[in-house]
Image (cartoon, rainbow, N blue to C red):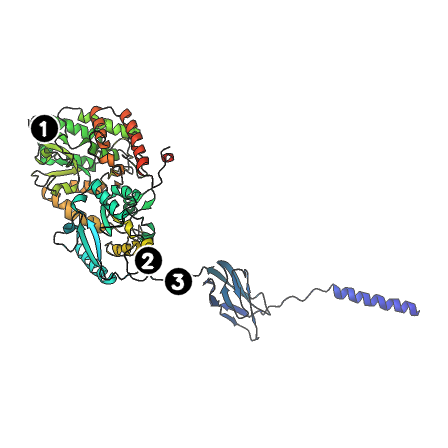
Amino acid sequence: MKTKNTLFMILILCLGLVLTACKKPDPVVDDPTASISVDVSSVSVKKGAAHQIVATVANTKEALTVAYASSNTAVATVSDTGLVRGVAKGSAVITVSLSKYPNIKATVNITVTEEDQPIVEPSVPNMMGQDFIIMVNKASTTDPRSEAYVGNWKKEKVALIAEVEKKYNVKVVYKTYPADAVWGGGRERFITTNSVNNTPQAHIYEMPSYSIAVLAEGGAVLPLDALIEKYGNQGYWPEKAAFGTVLGKQYAYDDAYPLVGQGIFYNIDLLETYLGEGKGTLPSDLWMAGEWDWNAFKNICNQLLPGIAGLNVEGAAVIGGRPYNWAYFMLGANGTHVVSSDLKSELATQAGIDTLTYLNSLISIPGMWEFESAALSNATCPQFKGGNIAFHNGEPYWLYDATKWLGYTFRMGFVPYPVGPNVKSDLSNYYINEVYGKTSYLVSSSYSLELVPPGYENIAFHEESIFRIWADLQYFPDIDPKTGYVSTNEIVDEWVFNTLELYYSDANDYVSIEAHKDIMFKGYPDYFYSLYWARSQDATKSFMLELQQAIISGSIRDEMIDLVARIHQEFLDTYVNLGLTADHYK
């Protein structure tokens, strides 16, 4: 009996243990009224910095504690008091809850950013009253302080000079190139010789953009990419930068936007005489109507030919000017180039051959074209100024240049070169090939920072101090928020008012002004003249004269294939130091 009672008691105890083991834990009971909130839902914290989360517990009488937890402690940590500290760049979520009631919670999104590098403003150089020399074509017309100044923004630029002279303790001086460096190859040799020999004649040199490659190859000028990035205008125009760039490096910087004005100038009176009353501006009217193409130009030329031939004046013709000059721009108006910005000639492309063949079809007609009276040094035919040639290539400054057309007595019209068949309907590949380049300003290689002894960086001229001074002398209008680049509105208005309206408004020739405005942004940096033999006047070696002869003779395709091969070889022979290799032309 005793044994049975004992067994019974053991069974009762085991059953109690089983029942106890199977019992579920009590659920977390949330306070139905308690709440928690945080002062921010998201916050950005720099790496190494801290932010205090402020949590507020409400709707309860209990003394509740708050718990904090980070979803990613590798990015952000949080203390027991809610102090968040950025550890590494990234994102994390901080959960803020009630310790007693963990289901009552709020979250804060944390973004950790890299620590800002301290901005250290470079010290301003003190040039101790030294001259800052800018060498230019003609100092009197380039120095804004001169009465003879012909550029824009005179008042603004004079003020900038005063500010710069005070800021850097420097004297800004404009000098004209010496007689042995008037232009072209002579000037290139002058700069190269003095720069390489560390006998610089100026800090800044004015040069046409086609010379930049020559000077860069000779080690005469310095690339400015890093300095432009650091000190240049943040809205600097890419189309301007293109004129100062050679094989990926930028060597020039200034505030002159590369507006273009190259086109065909024509005698309105002559056209009205032989085409009929009211048709004096027919070429410009056709351009504005979108109908100015090769056929339209040739048709008008053919209509003018009998009347002009009947003048019996030596040198009279329908078209005037050097054929190679016409070719440069007719090629652009047919969507191609003489030499592209990557130093490849396009003369032998189908568009190139078609353009030159078209010009041959005009020059082959007796009495149609006069060019022999256009001296190589001047390239203009006297009879255009005399009123006996209908069309002549040119650009606006020829209107007031004493060596060109100053003093003409007829009404002058302007029309862009006729649109070739290779050009898209939106004219997106219609170019003004700027073979003659755009005015550019360069820094002599004599002022490399490497040449300055340690400790003299702030009082000696070197590339950085020179560029800072030069950059501060430039006047740029405000940046256009729509484009992110310096606005061209004021620049265009200034050009139209000071140049175009001056020469067209008196004749009520506003259609010529509108035609100018249509193509003023279509400049392209053609690199043909960066080869010496391209612009040479040597009849036996000149590439431009060879191009002209092909147009006259009509032997175009084979001549251009051969000429392109020699142009490319000349580039290879000339630009060794710039890293140009034969693979570039494969």
- Element type at mark 1: helix
Q: Give amino acid for label 1.
A: Ile
**Mark 2 Cα within 10 Å, few/some/many (few <14, many 20+)?**
few
- Element type at mark 3: loop
The spot of residue 115 in percent (x, y) is 44, 61
The spot of residue 118 in percent (x, y) is 39, 62
Residue at image position (34%, 44%) is 248
Q: Which of the 4 image quarters holds residue 62?
A: bottom right
Which quadrant of the figure contains the N terminus?
A: bottom right
Which quadrant of the figure contains the C terminus?
A: top left
Q: Earlier in the sequence, mark 2 or mark 3?
A: 3
Residue position marked by numbered label 1 in the rendering: 308
Q: Nearer the viewer, residue 450 or 174?
A: 450
Residue position marked by numbered label 3 in the rendering: 118
Q: Nearer the viewer, mark 2 or mark 1?
A: 2
Total marks in image:
3
Q: Nearer the viewer, residue 543 or 100?
A: 543
The spot of residue 464 in percent (x, y) is 30, 55
Q: Is residue 43 above or below residue 178?
A: below
Residue position marked by numbered label 2 in the rendering: 453
The spot of residue 224 in percent (x, y) is 31, 50
Q: Give amino acid for label 3.
A: Pro
